[in-house]
Amino acid sequence: MSRAAAIERATAYFDDGRFAADLARRVAIPSTCQEPDRGAAIRAYLDEIAAALRALGCTARVLDNPSAGGPPFLLAERIEDDRAPTVLTYAHGDTIRGQDGAWSAGRSPWRLEMAGARLYGRGTADNKGQHTINLAALAAVVAARGRLGFNLRILFEMGEEVGSTGLAELCAAHRDGLLRAEILIASDGPRIAPGRPTLFLGARGGKMIDLVVDLRPGGHHSGNWGGLLANPVIILAQAIATITDARGAIRVPEWRPSLPESVRRVLAGLTIDPGETGPAIDADWGEPALVPAERVYAWNSFEVLAFTAGDPAAPVNAIPGSARAHCQLRYVVGTDPADIIPALRRHLDRHGFAMVALRPWTHGDFRASRLDPDDPWVGWAAGSIERTTGMAPAILPNIGGSLPNDLFVETLGLKTIWVPHSYAGCSQHAPDEHLLAPVAREALAIMAGLFWDLGEADGRPPRARRPQ
């Protein structure tokens, strides 16, 4: 059998309705990790995936979370030849809340519905649809060749949407056993444009910081005390205004990374397409010397996600006693994560805002990571996708969002390549989440070709030696 036969099997899986049937069954399992009463659904989802993996010839086992109270993990493997490379693939079967009742046209988040080119349902884009594609592509290769031609290890987690609880401990415990591999190939996140195959090589880091000005208990009448009492909201607004300029360009020196030439080169000429439902890009926002692709894929961004003082829903004539801003730094490789908070502290002190307290969150942080765009594996993967689609993929050094990719790079010592099957306008984490049918079908072909090529000894990069 041939590469073309594997691709044909993968696309037939979409055309004859099996993809929609499998995805519908998986969407119907309400495996949200954000609701404490969904434990049975989370376990049911792992059972669903374990059955698919065993049909693929894998051994599969469910492991308890090393962190007390965290959701379980699923680890599986298919070892064909100790002399062949070992690939780890990762996915998450958990979703955010369904947001029942907020979907358009009376849709249910837990029922797959196709309307036009869109497959609606919670998890269709993040991440059930994406890993359903990859599992089917692996099965197509086994059916066409009779084997993969490489060793496969698979990691499913069920707590990605709440910060990947226990994943760091799991990776450390199984680094030299069930998770030992040479490269990670997985799928999550959006393409740069719906019609443009995309590779990304890592993820921006994310650091959550609360900025707080707490001057006094309670509020005081603004007529009696206005002009006499410092207003914490004004102080905090002025402090935040020193962190960026009026167009959002970062002013904290330590938060301004270098931009390697290899990163700039792969981003040259790339256009970000948010799709029909995505917001228009503000061309005059962010670092002025950079083009939009560089601003989101190669640079840091500071965002204020929420700002509260007093009672915004029912304001009264009182000067608030305190104000809080929930902020976030998205950062790339080259930013010292240990110096993010100290650098901000030094910056605010220099500008006279010693009264602004910094309170980093104790969860939800990810470290930045990326594979060098010049790595041979990147060229190999891009070549495979181009052979399948006739189009050179966009290569992003990292996505703008965050994933636990740092654990795969730093703890497991892997090179990492991600092939996303969604797009920016997919309504991920919102009502009306959907997967585009044409993208899903093309993705099945892409992944079947990629996994086929991975099993061909001729043409793939030399085996990587994992750092000890």
Image (tube, rainbow, N blue to C red):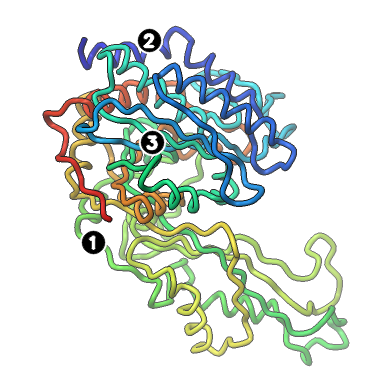
> Residue flagged by tag 1: what amino acid is it?
Pro
Q: Earlier in the sequence, mark 1 or mark 2?
A: 2
Whole-percent x, y for residue 391 in the image = 23, 30
Mark 3 is surrounded, within 10 Å at the Cα level, by few (under 14), some (14 to 19) or many (20 or more) other residues, namely many
* Disc 2/disc 3 C-alpha distance (Å): 23 Å
**Tag 2: Cα neighbours inside 10 Å, few (<14), some, or many (≥20)?**
some
Q: Is residue 13 above or below residue 61?
A: above
Q: Which residue is mark 1?
A: 260
The percent coordinates of residue 80 (x first, y second) are 28, 25
Residue 241 shows in the view: yes
Task: Give the alpha-carbon distance from disc 1 to disc 2, as whole Å.
Answer: 42 Å
Q: Which residue is mark 3?
A: 89
Give how far apart the Cα atoms at labels 3 and 1 are: 28 Å
Report the mark closest to the observer, 2 or 3. Answer: 3
Q: In this view of the protein, can residue 390 be seen by the observer? A: no
In the rendered image, residue 4, in percent from the top left (x then y), is placed at 23, 14
Q: Nearer the viewer, mark 3 or mark 1?
A: 3
Secondary structure of the residue carrying tag 1 is loop
Q: Position of residue 159 (x, y in %)?
A: 58, 44
Q: Residue furthest left?
A: 458
| Residue type marked 2 | Ala
Q: Earlier in the sequence, mark 3 or mark 1?
A: 3
Q: Residue at x 25, y 11 (%)?
A: 5
Check the picture and name the quadrant holding the C terminus. Answer: bottom left
Mark carried by residue 12: 2
Q: Which structural element holds mark 2?
A: helix
Local packing at callout 1 (Cα closer than 10 Å; few below 14, some 14-19, many 20+) is few
Residue nearest the observer in this picture, 132 or 54: 54
